Image (cartoon, rainbow, N blue to C red):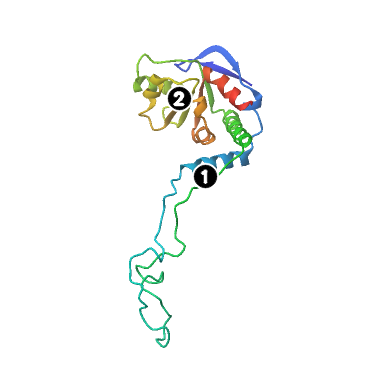
Amino acid sequence: MEVKVLDINGKETGRTVTLSDSVFAIEPNKHAVYLDVKQYLANQRQGTHKAKERAEVTGSTRKIKKQKGTGTARAGSIKNPLFKGGGTIFGPRPRSYSFKLNKNLKRLARKSAFALKAKESNLVVVENFDFEAPSTKNFINFLKALGLENKKSLIVLGDTNKNVYLSSRNLKATSVVTTSELNTYAILNANSLVLLESSLAGIEDNLSK
């Protein structure tokens, strides 16, 4: 598929680039996308939750009343989970929520995410640019030129660019990543995807293996 290349001012350069159909024009696999996003979100969880159970709460282990003849339920100690201040029954314990996925499935998920953005016309290709020095103002002007100042956007660079990254760091709705940092969640979480020309080769190379 062919896409027009825009400049930093949002105007057409008169050039087009051909995006690989094997990456940007496949039939999206929604289940692969679901699994990859689920894994990403699961990996963000710390899993440090903990509730004290019966053996861990502070309290006497003395039997608080005789076993029979009281007319109420039997109880062993004040740490009984049924009493106020007692232990928690089957409370959460520290654990890892991470799980493994096949590399080919993760690759398919990223392809599907790109294909969805291309299908929705939320994908833009911009020629390579740089700033002489970090400037949030210049970066905002760049977003305004593309009509993205009020939208969540993901800018994908071919290589690390310190000035562009630092210029975007104060903007909550915008993320700047390199091709090696791309993941399915980041692609789908953005309203618009902005690809620099230098990133196309890396994206297609990573996803065509």
- What's the residue type where badge 1 is placed? Ser
State the quadrant of the N terminus.
Answer: top right
- What's the residue type where badge 2 is placed? Gly
**Quarter holding residue 87:** bottom left
**Quarter holding residue 61:** bottom left
Give the residue at the far front of this rendering.
61
**Horizontal placement of 168 versus 42: left or right?**
left
Task: Determine which residue is flagged by label 1.
Answer: 98
Q: Is residue 131 above or below residue 178?
A: above
Residue drawn at 52 percent across, 36 percent down:
185
Residue drawn at 44 percent across, 29 percent down:
175
**In this orientation, which residue lies closer to the viewer: 37 or 66?**
66
**Horizontal placement of 102 versus 170: left or right?**
right
Horizontal and vertical percent position of residue 121: 56, 28
State the quadrant of the C terminus.
Answer: top right
Mark 1 is surrounded, within 10 Å at the Cα level, by few (under 14), some (14 to 19) or many (20 or more) other residues, namely some
Horizontal and vertical percent position of residue 124: 53, 23
Horizontal and vertical percent position of residue 60: 33, 71
Q: Is residue 93 above or below residue 132?
A: below
Task: Determine which residue is flagged by label 2.
Answer: 147
Q: Is residue 63 above or below residue 182?
A: below
Given this view, does label 1 or label 2 mark the residue nearer the observer? 1
Horizontal and vertical percent position of residue 116: 59, 32
**Quarter holding residue 5:** top right
Marks 1/2 in contact by CB < 8 Å: the verdict is: no
**In this orientation, which residue lies closer to the viewer: 175 or 93?**
93
Q: State which tag comes first along the sequence, 1 or 2.
A: 1
**Label 1 – label 2 distance at C-alpha:** 38 Å
